[in-house]
Image: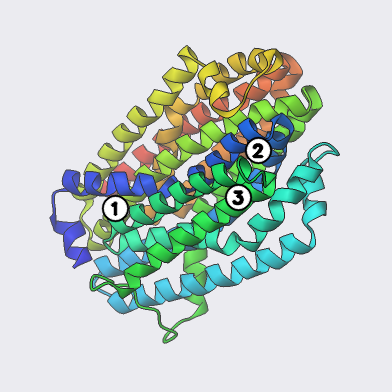
Amino acid sequence: MQTDTFTTQPVRKLFFHYLLPSICGTMVTSIYVLADTIIIGKGIGIDAMAALNIVLPLFNIFFGTGLLFGVGGSVLMSIARGRGDADAGHRYFSTAVLLNAATSILYMFLFIFFLEDIARFLGATNVTMPYIMDYAPYILWGLAFFSFSTFLQTFVRNDGAPRLSMAGVVTGGILNVILDIVFVFPLNMGMAGAAIASVIGSITTCLILLCHFFSKKNGLKFTLKGLSPSFALSIYKNGFTSFLLEVLAGFVMFIFNLQILKYVGDIGVSMYGVITNSSIVVTCLCNGINQASQPIISTNHGAGLHDRIQTVKRLGLRTALIICAVPAILGLIVPNMFTYIFLNPNAEILALSETAIRIYFSGFFVMGINIFVIGYFQSTVKPQFSLILCLSRGCILSVLFVYVLPLFFYVAGIWASVPLAEFITLAVALFFLKKTEKEVTA
């Protein structure tokens, strides 16, 4: 039934039917991180926000793992369905569930036993370490729920239930915000309260998404029959770029934190927290566009319907450009608006933020296009192109520039690193798109 829908209904109608639920689904990352950041920044203080920014790369790992197995498995499931092989689709889903569960358990033991060493490695100082140790342990005990929230969203949405996926995320996110406020302000639970609120919200999201398996529309079947290492390898191969998008964002955040500590100090890390959280929102919007497109592209790719794929690609690129232009323009016109959202800033923070936000946000103009093209190549099983683009924008160029540019432009060079990486990646992405279009028409 889902296959017929994706291959026969008007493409434009399908795309926009999935767009809002998909964006709401991917916003789960930003909802949990943003709620904690705003409440901690406003209710506890600048040092606490700096501590949270040091811990944020762990969230990238947890959510990235859910995307690794969720996107990797659901793309292959959709392609198998497009080819009429429902049994293979069930095996991809089952393998992905087992991989996600095993990896989450491994993370839990690793991070819990070595938490303080990991925090020091990420850049914790004597000022920020007490806040980190109040916050991180609760997050680590709930990390499986963060991973499975993104994992289940992807499969439930690809199984034709985008509204349930949206409902799960919105409900969990609203509950998280309410509990954040209650735990931090009236109950005065500090960092621990913010962390517990996030875990409860994520558990709620998972429970709602699990309701899909009791629905008459459920097409996801767990089975241990016919599983093989080849299924796991295919899932890893196809989902690895999604994992890298998240994890490299955390890695770049870690490198930036070290450079900012070197050039500015803890107050610079607090300022960078404003930028990273704004960037997380934009990235989630872009991922939502990707995930609205992915089941349509993958299923039609399996069915060999290339004209429908081209229509989705055009819609996705235009939507990404329009959505990402809004925060980019706001950052150029009213940069301090974003600072006041997250902090009660002093004069020193405001002096840093105006220039930093204007430079950094200019990269948003093309970020959406780059992320969409990466997802497009994943959905059409061209992981080599998506991996090159992912590494270019998410690691190689950003890290290179963040070390080189400050030597010539001081702190402004740090803020310019990511936008420059995005524009160079755009040129490579356009080259790859033209190359694949010639292959299809040849």
Q: Which circle, 2 or 1, is nearer the viewer? A: 2
Which sits earlier in the primary sequence, circle 2 or circle 3? 3
Q: Quadrant of residue 406?
A: top right
Q: Name the residue under label 2.
A: 253
Q: Position of residue 285 (x, y in %)?
A: 41, 39
Using the image, determine if residue 19 lies above or below residue 224: above
Mark 3 element type: helix
Q: In which quarter of the image is residue 351?
A: top right
Q: Which residue is drawn at 72% across and 39% down?
A: 51
Q: Which circle, 1 or 3, is nearer the viewer? A: 3
Estimate the spatial distance between the alpha carbons at disc 1 and disc 3, rounded to whole Å.
Answer: 28 Å
Q: Residue at x 66, y 16 (%)?
A: 352
Using the image, determine if residue 350 lies above or below residue 390: above
Q: Farthest residue to the front: give it.
A: 186
Would residue 127 be found to the left or right of residue 325 on screen?
A: right
Q: Within 10 Å of the Cα at label 3, are there few (<14), some (14-19), or many (20+) other Cα atoms? A: many
Which sits earlier in the primary sequence, circle 2 or circle 1? 2
Labelled disc at residue 258? none
Q: Within 10 Å of the Cα at label 2, are there few (<14), some (14-19), or many (20+) other Cα atoms? A: many
Would residue 437 be found to the left or right of residue 58 on screen?
A: left
Mark 2 residue type = Met
Q: Mark 3 points at which residue?
A: 59
Mark 2 element type: helix
Estimate the spatial distance between the alpha carbons at disc 2 and disc 1, rounded to whole Å.
Answer: 31 Å
